[in-house]
Amino acid sequence: MTRRIQNLILTKGECPVIDLRATYAADRYRVKKDECGDQLIPHRWGHFYSHSSTELACFMKGNYKFRKIKAQFPSIRVTQRGDEEVIFVFDSALLPQLAATLKASRKRRVSEAERERLKLLSQIHSPFRRESLRSCEEPSAAFPLVKMRSSLLDR
């Protein structure tokens, strides 16, 4: 049984952890679930995950990159260090800076103008367009998007 209190997830027999989807998904971070159902924010060398109600943890491969991060953020604590991977814990307020440094996966955001442009391009290049529109003598009359094709592709 899972309960939610503010931005925490409480499960039976476990301590509360930060709900990444409720807390950080609006900040454009892509939140995924692993095989166990735990929430993760993937980044280029690993992933972030909830450690407690106030802290997050990071799994990353590559000790060479970790040395630079430890120099930038001296408040992080190493909990496990292997030959090629490291797990460290940090305060949740550091996530935006660490996510920028480690290149966390971000949600794609498209403006309305760009969305319209992509929609028109999709209609022009769609393989599911009716054949009668393709073989028409005057395509701009039957399919007005063909006229806009060159102006859209020039952007």
Image: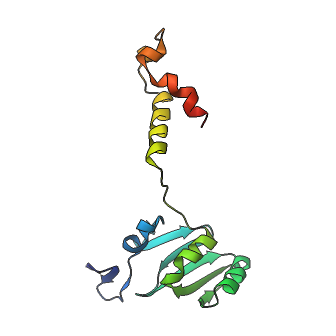
Residue 59 in which image quadrant: bottom right
Left-right relation of 60 to 108 = right
In the foreground, 87 or 143: 143
Q: Is residue 145 visible?
A: yes
Q: Residue placed at 31% from the left, 89% from the top? A: 13
Q: Residue placed at 46% from the left, 33% from the top? A: 120
Picture layout, residue 79 above or below residue 18: below
Picture layout, residue 155 above or below residue 16: above
Residue 77 in which image quadrant: bottom right
Picture layout, residue 114 above or below residue 145: below
Location of the N terminus (image quadrant):
bottom left
Q: Residue placed at 34% from the left, 79% from the top? A: 7
Q: Is residue 83 visible?
A: no
**Percent coordinates x, y for residue 126 in the rendering:** 47, 30
Name the colouring of the figure. Answer: rainbow
**Percent coordinates x, y for residue 15 in the rendering:** 36, 89
**Percent coordinates x, y for residue 55 in the rendering:** 47, 86
Q: How many marks?
A: 0
**Percent coordinates x, y for residue 14 in the rendering:** 35, 88
Q: Residue placed at 46% from the left, 85% from the top? A: 51
Location of the C terminus (image quadrant):
top right
Left-right relation of 81 to 13 = right
